[in-house]
Amino acid sequence: MSEVVVFSGGPHPFVGNPRESCEVAQRDSINEVVGAAAYVVAADSGLHLALACGRMPDLVIGDMDSVDPSLLEQARWGGAEIRSFPQDKDATDLELALETVNASLDPKFDSVTVIGSQAGRVDHLLSGMLLLGSERFAGLRIDAWFGDTYLAIVRDSRKILAETGQFVSVMALNATAQGVCSTGLRWAFQREELSPGSTRGVSNEFVETSATISLDQGCLTVIIDKEQRS
């Protein structure tokens, strides 16, 4: 499996301090994911975070309304492809990045990790989560880090690693999930339906160091705040 990393735009409070940026990015193996990536995309000001993590992106995409022009020029000279869009557009920069990964890259790229921030506008964070669960990207294995919060998109079955006692939430995205099952969680799912807006899967807990979550139909997001334990 070959990994693509997409750095999303938005406010990254630690980007102004390169040393702190790298320390934050190294937590929970994010640095390992970035270092092993076969292809890196920066969505607009995601370029700031990519460079703070020590990785020159292969592609910078977006309307460039919030990217530092000097860093954009640095990326250009560093060999990155720059794809600029008008600010008056019908998609977020993250959506443009994911569409590009899904449609334009070699089929061997089947795994995507999005790295961004929890800070900023709630509508951007919520739309980003819903975007990751879009049926358009059903052929991709998608993980995401928003600050210290990890998300995994589950469409069939995923094994999720964590510490015993770690809180985890499992939520349906976009439509009712059918036949939801789990192992390794305090409150097990046993071939259940889980609908968007239900709090049934909120604040569950790992009772082992891994959990398996599966479903027959639909899409789930598994959310783990790495700073929170029971």
Image: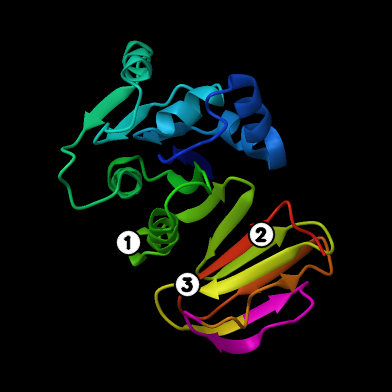
What amino acid is labelled 3 in the image?
A: Cys
Q: Earlier in the sequence, mark 2 or mark 1?
A: 1
| Nearer to us in this view, 52 or 120 | 120
Left-right relation of 162 to 219: right
Residue at 44 percent across and 55 percent down: it is 125
Left-right relation of 133 to 52: left
Quick one: SS at disc 3?
A: loop
Distance of mark 3 from mark 1, alpha carbons?
Answer: 12 Å
Residue at 37 percent across and 18 percent down: it is 75
Residue that mark 2 sits on: 224
Give above or below for 58 relative to 210: above
Quick one: SS at disc 1?
A: helix
Residue that mark 1 sits on: 136
What amino acid is labelled 1 in the image?
A: Arg
What amino acid is labelled 2 in the image?
A: Ile
Mark toward the viewer: 3 or 2 = 2
Residue at 33 percent across and 43 percent down: it is 97
Mark toward the viewer: 2 or 1 = 2
Rate crowding at label 2 as few (under 14), some (14 to 19) or many (20 or more) other CA atoms within 10 Å.
many
Picture quadrant of residue 157: bottom right
Residue that mark 3 sits on: 219
Rate crowding at label 1 as few (under 14), some (14 to 19) or many (20 or more) other CA atoms within 10 Å.
few
The magenta segment is 181-197
